[in-house]
Amino acid sequence: MFSLLIKIIFVFCFILFALIIIMLFKAKENRLTKHTLLFDEFPKSFDTFRIFFISDIHRRTISKKMLEMVPDSINLVVIGGDLTEAGVPFQKVEKNLNVLKKIAPIYFVLGNNDYEVGKDKLEYLLTKHGVTILNNSSATITSNTGEKLILLGVEDMSEDRDRLDITLDHLPEGDFRLLISHNPDIYHKLKKADNISLILSGHTHGGQIRIFGLGLYEKGKLHNLKKASLLISNGYGTSGIPLRLGAPAEAHFIQLKHTSLHNE
């Protein structure tokens, strides 16, 4: 009996060790999820608008393999929060910013972990690298015919830092609105009258570790909801322990088009 128990413990430990090794490798994967999103209200004059969206980098260094997957002619890069966290050297953050700004201009919103390194210090670093920080504010991108794509960004929802009301104040009517929020729960604060077409978010890591399909959060995906389309990313890095299972690390290549241009 004692010998059998020892064998069972040995097998269990071996399986656990193998699983941890697998999860360590899964946490370092590079996956570019591609989306072509069609909207009746998207300005035709932009033709196809291309976004590289990455969220929840945390302690990871963006790999050369991931960068090689990113297509040419990206219009902008969106960092959806948790660029860093406590204990990450600013040199690593700068290294990630240096590779991202080679792709396209960067737009950024704060995530809950970003505050751990000091909001003012992080924003100084971002500004030094030419990053547009959307702290309850907006930025407008204008096509060559004068049509507008409006990027809105809110601070993280922790401690009620988000102020969607301020972000929406004085925005022009009739333009395409894209909201960036680290936490996808911002959707519940939206009104249909806000005319936001798309939300980009992360935060949940897709549960990060899913056992038999179950996790703390739903696996990231695109949700076509009544008030807006909501893209929730699994994120590129990990929080807490550097392990993943069943919620692949990812970044996103997003193409925005007017519905009528789908087959062109």
Image: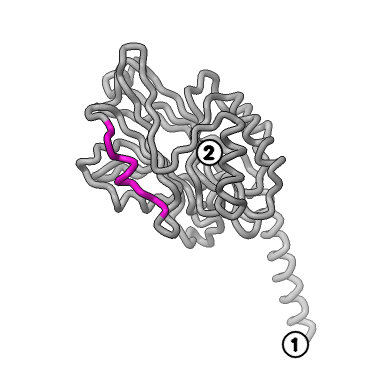
Residue 4 at x, y = what percent? Answer: 75, 81
Task: Assign the C terminus to one quadrant of the image.
Answer: top left
| Residue at image mark 1 | 1
Would residue 110 be visible to someone looking at this image?
A: yes
Would residue 248 be visible to someone looking at this image?
A: no
The amino acid sitting under disc 2 is Ile
> Which quadrant would residue 140 be assigned to in this image?
top left
Q: Is residue 165 magenta?
A: yes
The amino acid sitting under disc 1 is Met
Q: Which residues are magenta?
A: 161-171
Task: Assign the N terminus to one quadrant of the image.
Answer: bottom right
| Residue at image mark 2 | 54
Of labels 2 and 1, earlier in sequence is 1
Q: Of helix, strand and loop, which one carries label 2? A: strand
Mark 2 packing: few (<14 Cα in 10 Å), some, or many (20+)? many
Residue under the image location 73 percent in, 63 percent down: 17
Q: Point out the frontmost of discs 2 and 1.
A: 2
Q: Nearer the viewer, residue 167 or 102?
A: 167
Farthest-out residue, left: 193
Q: Is residue 200 magenta?
A: no
